[in-house]
Image (tube, helix red, strand yellow):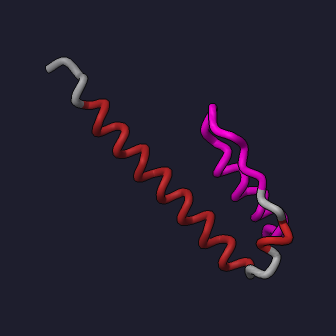
Amino acid sequence: MESTKEQLILDIENLLNRYDGLKPTHIDPALLQFMDRQTLLSIIDTILRQQEKTNESNIEWLEQFKKQ
């Protein structure tokens, strides 16, 4: 089942709003309507990769506090 552009826009918002304590992000759907489905999927992919990279960096940073 293919996601609609509206659903993809909501998915982008949800990914951006994953972190507590930050002001919620709201994307005006009209702003992204000119983008095709592939572009929206690419944005989602980029956000997920950035979040994964951030998580890996956090793990590396936390590792320094482990007792040897």
Residues 60 and 32: in front is 32
Residue 59 percent across, percent down from the top left: 34, 37
Q: Residue furthest front?
A: 23
Is residue 23 positioned above or below 34 on the image? above
Residue 62 percent across, percent down from the top left: 31, 30
Is residue 68 positioned above or below 48 on the image? above
Q: How many marks?
A: 0
**Which region is colored magenta?**
1-26
| Relative horizontal placement of residue 36, taking residue 41 as reference (left or right) | right
- Quadrant occupied by the N terminus: bottom right
Let me know if residue 14 is in the magenta part.
yes
Let me know if residue 29 is in the magenta part.
no
At 69% across and 58% down in the image, what residue appears? 12
At 50% across and 51% down in the image, what residue appears? 51
Residue 15 percent across, percent down from the top left: 65, 51
At 84% across and 66% down in the image, what residue appears? 29
Figure quadrant of residue 56: top left
Residue 31 percent across, percent down from the top left: 79, 71
Figure quadrant of residue 55: top left
